Amino acid sequence: MLTVAEHPGPNSAIALLSEVRKKVTQAADRQIVAALHLFLAEIETKRGAFSAVQRHINTGKRLLESQPNLWLEGVAATSQSCLCFLESDIEKADTEARRGLELAILSGHAITRLASTINLSHIHLARGDTGRAQHRLSEALSMCGQGGGAEIAVLDGLAQVKLAEGDLEGAERTWSRIVARGVTPGETLSYYQVCALLTRAKVLLTGGRHEQASSFLSQALEAACRTADPSVVNPLRLAKAEALAMQGKLSDAADLIYQAAEATDPASVDIIAEVQRVAGKVLARAGKAGAAAVCFERSARILGAVGNICARDAALRDFDAAVADRKRITTERAAAAPGVLHRAAAVLDLASHPELAGREMLELLRETGCVRRARLVAGGRKSDVLADMASPAQAPDEQRADEVRMALGIRRERSIELIAEPKRDLESRLSLLAARGLLKAALSLEEHRRNEREQAALWPSETTSETPEGVFASQQMAELLSTSRKIAATNLTVLITGETGSGKEVLARAIHRASSRGSHAFLPFNCTSVPRDMLDAQLFGYRRGAFTDAHTDFPGVIRSAAGGTLFLDEIAELGHDVQPKLLRFLETGEIHPLGEARPIHVDIRVIAATNAKLEHLVSAGTFREDLFYRLNVIRFQVPPLRERREEIPLLVDRFLRQFSEEFHKTGLRVAEETIEFLLLYSWPGNVRQLANEIRRMTALAENGAVLTPEHLSNDLAASRRTVPSADRSTPPSEVVVRLDQPLGAAVEHVERALVRFALDASGGRLDPAAKALGISRKGLYLKRQRLGLDPPAARLAAV
């Protein structure tokens, strides 16, 4: 597929990625960030990290929702088509490729149009429609220049079409054109060149030139192995195994098949099917017709299920050519000893594809004979039976057992489920239990594989985590979140330090949510919220009558958090009288409320936070050293917002959504120049200050407004020291109004600028400002209140 672009190697990409991500994110342009994600999707496609590919595509699409871009939307659709094709979802690949082509035509982007056209040709060929495939490839050939990767991809597609039609002479002529472009087995091969060499090898094999094919493939394999890309190396291995098998070198062929099968990602359904087809040819040459039949049928079944009709028909033709009596062998294949073992292995290999794994499970249940009937069902809005299997007729008096349901996963947003009616005898029940255990193990193994692929991704999802508590987008915050999740399951005391408003409570809530206490209370308590002489009673509680004003029992903050997490903010403000009692509680888990005869045990986890340097307070003698060491078991330092500015655009998005919902505002957007102000500000109040700034702007804005720098508070507006991005030199008496907003929002923008200019011109005096505006003093007062333009203290003093 053309969208599998030839980028620099993964290692160099990783080396540059951190710097690129930082600069792109700080640019605060959704379209640029979307473009980066779509670029990474192409790289991850080459690496075979399909889950990461889908995540990057989804992120790119989401970013483009608020700032549409036909070109990038076309790239996203084309990349989605490529991913669906590689995952053997032919139907969705077709839909996305057509959408990508439409968007490319609208945007006029030639490269995306070419890529979509080539993708559609592959889809037509897979469906067996060689005529339409050739038509698309002819269109593509007229669009691409000579000698580039695109032309090689198109010529390779034309050779595949000729091969599928049985026109070997036509395929040879096309190969001559590819050779003329300099494509031969050599020292360095690109992705498209390797694909062309594979097609050439298949032409030689189809023509019966097995020795020539074997020699050709040896050279191609040697060069392709340098790419370290199994997606191109494994098909060459399998082609060479087929060539060796046709020469009678069955052991060497078996070695190559084993290497390919071992290195194949379970997500690569086409390679799994190819392994089975070539294995069938080797087994047939070895005289093991029953085992060969199992492999050929599995290959055809997999390819038919995913809609690759061209490859399925090729597998069936090989079946007919390799096995003399296909019908008889099919009937007797259950007698092949390795059959059940192969079925089990297939379930393990295909666990990432619920429907395919389900079909193999059906065959496994049929061969073991442990069920009366089994159905593979796709749920959702309506349930569809994908496959149905019934055992031979049972005895009339045999009763039906309850159905057993086995979930296999989600496919095209529909749950795939296997429903079995077991036989009632003990042996059948035990066999079904074993089959369920196999499926469970297969699904667990696939989850582990998926996690491994995710960890190896260029941009792991954890680095852009948006939890219910907050955003963890910078490298520092992502590392904090990752480490905090590791210790969340323990009951260790945690100390979080950092400036006021930097997000200490956000991190504490994330730890609580990830722990086993997540379903219980998270109770935040600020140690400065009550007078020092009441802090003891507030924390530890008291009995009625313990002192003069104790008219009722009070459990205290600690007991109120029982079973959950207590977050003690501003822990440095604890007085000397309370510090020993807190230390004892942390060491023993017991509190002694005022008036109680004996201590009470309380099961909670304590997370403490402070913006002070506790080490300095210990040195000064105002904080107990033993309490400091008891709190400082696990310590997290939350960096200030100015040290993680790449989070600002994401935080602005989050707060804008949150406060728009709170104030019932719709269609609000933040201008790029406003983001630039926000990125360059020092944020002494950190995330809390940013949240309050967005809250104020949202509350004062009209529906559909574009929030420009004029909406910012005076402190932020005055902080800008750089030249605006548009480099405007607008006089103070003029104002620029964006036209891409509703009339009400534009009028509000002009009103704000007029009132601010009049107040500045009058030195903050209301009467002359109102006269200049042609309104009454009361009218000016009301407008100033509505627009949030309270004059500075100096102006008020002058009134």
Image (cartoon, rainbow, N blue to C red):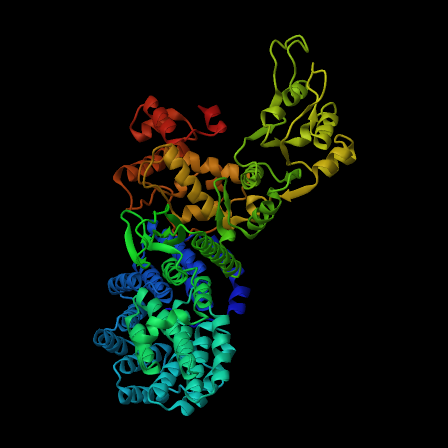
Q: Residue at x 34, y 54 (%)?
A: 372
Q: With respect to residue 561, does 197 lie above or below?
A: below
Residue 259 locus on image (x, y percent) = 51, 75
Front one among 256 and 84: 256
Q: Quadrant of residue 665?
A: top left
Quadrant for the N terminus, please.
bottom left
Residue 789 locus on image (x, y percent) = 41, 31
Could you tell whether 653 is left or right of 568 in the image? left
Front one among 327 and 799: 327
The answer, for residue 726, to whether it is visible in the render is no
Q: With respect to residue 333, does 489 lie above or below?
A: above
Could you tell whether 662 is left or right of 173 in the image? right
**Number of numbered markers:** 0
Residue 558 locus on image (x, y percent) = 63, 26
Could you tell whether 159 is left or right of 674 in the image? left
Q: With respect to residue 108, does 665 lie above or below?
A: above
Quadrant for the C terminus, please.
top left
Could you tell whether 591 is left or right of 484 in the image? right
Residue 66 locus on image (x, y percent) = 34, 49
The answer, for residue 611, to whether it is visible in the render is yes
Q: Quadrant of residue 601?
A: top right
Front one among 97 and 112: 97
Q: Quadrant of residue 279?
A: bottom left
Q: Residue at x 72, y 30 (%)?
A: 588
